[in-house]
Amino acid sequence: MLIDLRSDTVTRPTPGMLQYMMEAEVGDDVYEEDPTVNALEAKTAALFGMEAGLFCPSGTMTNQIAIKAQTEPLTEVICDFTAHIYQYEGGGIAFNSAASVALLHGERGKVTAEMVQSAVRPNDNLHYPVSKLVSLENTSNKGGGTFYTLPEIATIAQVCKTHNMAFHLDGARVFNALLAAQEAPEAYGQYFNSISICLSKGLGAPVGSVLLGSKELIYKSKRIRKVLGGGMRQAGFLAAAGLYALEHQVDRLAEDHARAKELGKTLQKCAYVSEVLSVETNIVIFKLAPALNPQSFLQKLKEKNILAIQFGPQQIRLVTHLDFTPSMLEYTIDVLKKLNF
């Protein structure tokens, strides 16, 4: 039994999802003739109170398309320094959009309206790039699964509106955030100009993300997707997995949160751990005692058939997901309790 806690991207389609995929009605999506893709785009857009959606292979693509569509050279993107769009998308903002980045140092990946306000450049100074787009990440990966609530989002949205800046959400784990905050997704449409919804993390689809926005923005984004090589043909087989996930695998994210909290409680009692970040959703980040070597720690876990990753100096990350069962949780807790250094 291998227990893979490196990420919630390691999940496999459930039998029900696989059957749904194989039975999907498909067509050529480049011609906009795939009914299952069309259904997924319409469903996610309606769910979040947006006009239209665009199915893409990855969250990186949806994020980069959104940035490209809403910036131009000599402009600037404002985000937290831990943001996925900055840390983990290969320098795509510079490569794809020729835009600058203003990095904020928020609390565990979360920035405030006041921080955004302070980062806005004066438009009458030619020495500066033009502040054009603000991007949030919900939940924050590097922040350990922290999340924005709607009131927090609303205050930042007001700053964006005041300064005529676009507002993007990297919603890689947005359903985890909505569940933890006990909020409904439809309110998001009134605040964001674009939203990236990932289907291949906690929701369990094998691949795919959806970019949401106005009809005008999605039309422009479709042209950018074509240039990036993201136009797919009979993509309905993949889109069906996303539809199934939205219909059957959203509420079960609460199980991931509960299991992550159990891991966090266990780690707090382990002598080899110096700190455990508060567990908000399905991500557990903890810091090893200074004398311990993180790679040696990971090797000991691996010898017990448990996979995790290093996530910073002395930091280890565990991520719970639908393939992490109750029996696996029990075994992992037992292993963590018995590790000696």
Image: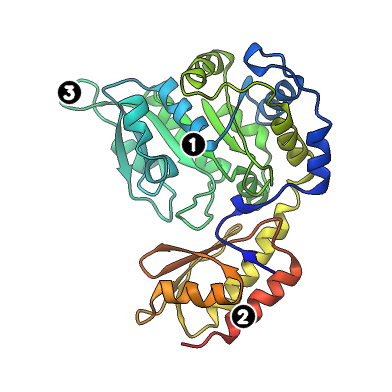
Choose between 296 and 275: the one closer to the eye.
296
Q: Mark 2 to mark 1: distance in Å?
A: 35 Å
Q: Which residue is mark 1?
A: 60
How crowded is the residue under tag 2: few (<14 C-alpha within 10 Å), some, or many (20+)? some
Q: Which mark is residue 294?
A: none
**Which numbered dot is residue 335?**
2
Query: In the shown orientation, is residue 53 left or right of residue 159?
Result: right
Q: Secondary structure at mark 2?
A: helix
Residue 124 location in percent, x, y?
A: 20, 20
Q: Are marks 3 and 1 in contact (CB under 8 Å)?
A: no
Q: Residues within 10 Å of mark 3 (few under 14, many from 20)?
A: few
Q: Nearer the viewer, residue 66 or 18?
A: 18
Marked residue nearer the N-terminal end (3 or 1): 1
Of pointers 2 and 1, the one earlier in the residue sequence: 1
Q: Which mark is residue 125?
A: 3
Spot the residue most to the left.
127
Q: Amino acid at mark 3?
A: Asn
Q: Secondary structure at mark 3?
A: loop
Amino acid carrying mark 2 in the image: Val
